[in-house]
């Protein structure tokens, strides 16, 4: 079982200090979240909301995922980095390839891409990308990225992307794992058929196990049951070593957790030191027991 945390809803300036603390405490990874903007007049309905409105205010910071990853990688030694999730089809293919390759090189191969199609049409429009074909373009972007990351002379010719023979350097020191998010049947099949893993949200136990079982079924259907596969999600039950050992038995390989949520870290607001106590306590009371 791997233990991850995240930067969502965190003060941007706290992220580097928290990454160092997680690295020192023995956590496995940290995920970044992604939005480009919050439009004044939001027309796109937010999923899983009766009101259709996102649960966060417009001024919530969403720092660039790969700038932040590069910065966190520079101040850590072993912590891995991914996303929950990165809206890759809202960007041009070559931009995505270049940013992730650079982060992989800077981190010494400690990054993976966890991509999703997103829900905000306004972001796609502002980025000049087609919202209606975002799923089909992600399906093509996944193998295209793997080709572009090989190094040397590379090219890609598909339905949505045309890349003439060229070099795009630096290229990653090794294969970059690609995971996807999304709870639809299409998204789950995309993960099982094409990817190295799946990223979910926060779930009750039965729901989390249901997704793990469904992904196992789909991977068996696609002849990939014996290949390594990562399932990264958060569990809404109270954290304990017993809970995460059960999750591991159910096929969940990684859990996201935020030990500082609802905890008094003993430092003033605005001081990153407030994260230290909860992180170290979680590492001692949960992670150490799981790994023992």
Image (tube, grey):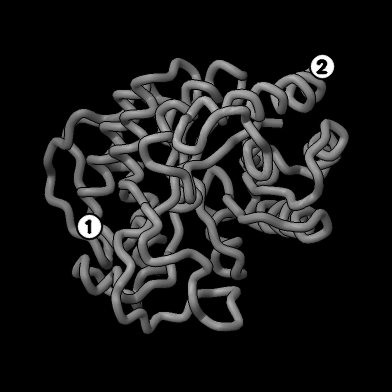
Q: Position of residue 283 (x, y in %)?
A: 70, 23
Residue 72 figure quarter:
top left
Is there CB contact under 8 Å for labels 2 and 1? no
Can residue 84 be spotted in the picture? yes
Residue 170 figure quarter:
top left
Crowding near the residue tagged with mark 2, few <14, some 14–19, many ≥20 C-alpha atoms within 10 Å: few
Q: Which comes before the other along the chain, label 2 or label 1?
A: 1
Give whichever of 286, 141 is nearer the camera.
Answer: 286
Give whichever of 77, 218 is nearer the camera.
Answer: 77
Mark 2 falls on what kind of element? loop
Q: Position of residue 157 (x, y in %)?
A: 23, 57
Q: Which residue occupies 52% across, 25% down? A: 273
Taking the view exactly as shown, the residue that stands out farthest to the front is 268
Q: Which residue occupies 32% across, 29% down? A: 71
Q: Position of residue 105 (x, y in %)?
A: 30, 25
Mark 1 falls on what kind of element? loop
Q: Which residue is mark 2?
A: 292
Residue 245 vertical position relative to residue 9 in the rendered view, above or below: above
Q: CA separation, marks 2 and 1?
A: 45 Å
Residue 203 figure quarter:
bottom right
Give whichever of 206, 187 is nearer the camera.
Answer: 206
Q: Position of residue 118 (x, y in %)?
A: 43, 66
**Image-based side of 25 in relation to 128, left or right:** right
Can residue 227 be spotted in the picture? no
Q: Which residue is mark 1?
A: 92
**Image-based side of 141 in relation to 17, left or right:** left
Residue 257 vertical position relative to residue 279 in the rendered view, above or below: below
Q: Which residue occupies 65% across, 35% down? A: 264
Q: Which residue occupies 43% across, 66% down? A: 57
């Amino acid at each position: 079982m791997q233990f991850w945390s995240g930067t969502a809803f965190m003060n941007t300036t706290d992220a580097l200090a928290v990454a160092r603390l997680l690295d020192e405490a023995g956590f496995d990874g940290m995920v970044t979240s992604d939005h480009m903007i919050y439009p004044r007049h939001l027309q796109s309905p937010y999923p899983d909301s009766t009101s259709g409105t996102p649960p966060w205010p417009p001024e919530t910071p969403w720092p660039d995922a790969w700038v932040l990853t590069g910065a966190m990688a520079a101040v850590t030694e072993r912590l891995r980095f991914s996303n929950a999730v990165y809206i890759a089809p809202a960007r041009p293919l070559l931009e995505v390839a270049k940013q992730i390759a650079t982060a992989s090189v800077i981190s010494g191969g400690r990054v993976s891409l966890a991509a999703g199609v997103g829900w905000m049409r306004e972001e796609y429009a502002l980025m000049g990308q087609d919202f209606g074909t975002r799923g089909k373009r992600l399906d093509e972007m996944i193998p295209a990225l793997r080709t572009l990351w090989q190094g040397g002379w590379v090219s890609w010719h598909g339905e949505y992307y045309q890349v003439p023979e060229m070099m795009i350097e630096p290229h990653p020191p090794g294969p970059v794992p690609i995971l996807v998010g999304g709870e639809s049947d299409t998204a789950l099949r995309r993960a099982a058929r094409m990817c190295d893993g799946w990223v979910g949200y926060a779930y009750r136990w039965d729901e989390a196990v249901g997704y793990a079982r469904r992904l196992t079924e789909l991977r068996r259907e696609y002849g990939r049951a014996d290949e390594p596969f990562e399932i990264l999600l958060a569990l809404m039950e109270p954290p304990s070593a017993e809970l995460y050992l059960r999750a591991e038995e159910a096929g969940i390989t990684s859990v996201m957790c935020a030990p500082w949520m609802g905890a008094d870290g003993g430092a003033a607001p605005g001081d990153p030191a407030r994260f230290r106590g909860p992180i170290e306590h979680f590492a001692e009371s949960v992670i150490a027991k799981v790994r023992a």
